[in-house]
Amino acid sequence: MGEYMLEQKVKLLCGPGKASEIGSLAAKLGKKKALLVTDKGIVATGIHNRVVDSLEQAGVNCVVFDGVVPDPTAQNVADGYKMCADHQCDLVIGMGGGSPMDTSKAINLLRFNPEPILRYADPQTSMEPAPGLIVIPTTSGTGSEMSDGLVISSDGVKHPILAPAAGAQFAVIDPELMVGIPPRLTQATGLDALSHAMEGYTSTAADTATDIINESLMRTIVEWLPKAVENGGDVEARQQMAVCASMAGWMLQYSHTNAGHSIAHILGSHYHIPHGEACAYATPWVLEFNAAAMPDRVMKIGRILGASFKGGETPEEIGAIARDAFIHFCDVTLGKLDITRYEVDKATFSSAADDIAGELFQVFNPRKMEPADALDILNKIFA
């Protein structure tokens, strides 16, 4: 038996309509002016006004920074921090998917630590705690609201930053903010959360405590994600998925991710494929690859996905069955995320494979992935 410690400093407020309580929360914290960090897509929907109105009703001023782009850049962070400093904001609120939440973490970190943000991509760089951050996810996938990391891009390269000091003080989970998400985005973000649980379950950092949580998350997502995709207005399905995404984000601090996210990060940085979809494309092939090292765990994942095993299968056969079960769940149960919409130059695959093999989260993969292995998976993804 091992010794395990789980700690979660983020205070989680969850339930329909919770976004309308942001103002009273900010006032209780003694805040006077908030920087709302989001993107133009959120602003176009108008749902950010629920937060702005709540703040104003509570006597808390608010300025909006909507310059966040997908795969947020170091320049995004610098621009947002300048607005924060210029307006003397004492509270940062991140609202949106992983990009606005990661950007809000970075901006708030710079309120208490020197610029530029990418200096903290070096794990040896120390940082002071950064209180005064509230995050409001509007998708159910990244889990950034509960994780200890963020990803910032520069010159087409994604830089993962492990920064417990940048974590949110509060995360507000309001499923009503998610009912308008279209099916494809619902599917992609949900598969991102599922990949967190699957990779955490097959991680070299997994332990008894994370296994219990990740197994439960996998089962719950497999049950509720199809319902959320089929009926976006199903508030119960949205809440189930939102909580799963947050809890899977928590597990990122302990069981982490592995080669699946290494591939997904490179698919995003090299080919601009949205992160959730990139995870969906990578996951079946990484399950198959890792079966040689963890056949029993890959078999359990296959069973959660609905696969049957007769007993006596080789690790290679287990991997193939689990791979096919994931593809069936993704393409048939949920609906195919057609990868042909993305144009890629296969001549760049060799370079991309080198980057995948050297990516940060490979350290948690149960089986060493060489560039040749990564190249094989890239060719299978885009076959």
Image (spheres, rainbow, N blue to C red):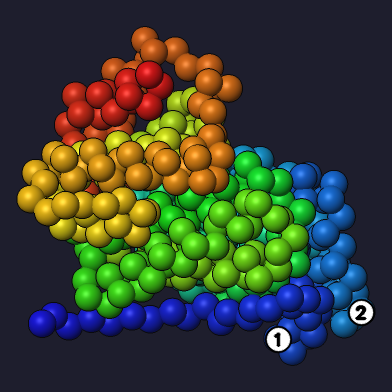
Q: Is residue 126 above or below residue 152?
A: below
Q: Tell me which corner region of the image, top left, top right, bottom left or bottom right, holds residue 81.
A: bottom right
Q: Is residue 22 left or right of residue 378?
A: right
Which residue has dot 2 on it? 57
Q: Residue furthest bottom?
A: 28
Report the amino acid beneath label 2. Answer: Gln
Horizontal and vertical percent position of residue 110: 57, 60
Q: Which image quadrant for residue 248? A: bottom left
- Where residue 312 appears, as percent x and y from the top left, is 7, 50
Q: Residue furthest top?
A: 347
Please report whichever mark, 1 or 2, sits nearer to the chain's N-terminal start: 1
Q: Residues within 10 Å of mark 1 (few under 14, many from 20)?
A: few
Give me the residue at 47% from left, 43% from top.
330
Dot 1 and dot 2 residues touching (CB under 8 Å): no
Task: Tell me the residue that label 1 is attached to.
Answer: 29
- The amino acid pointed to by label 1 is Leu
Give the class, few, some or many, for how many residues have Cα within 10 Å of label 2's Cα (few <14, many ≥20): few
**Which secondary structure lies at badge 2?**
helix
Mark 1 residue element: loop
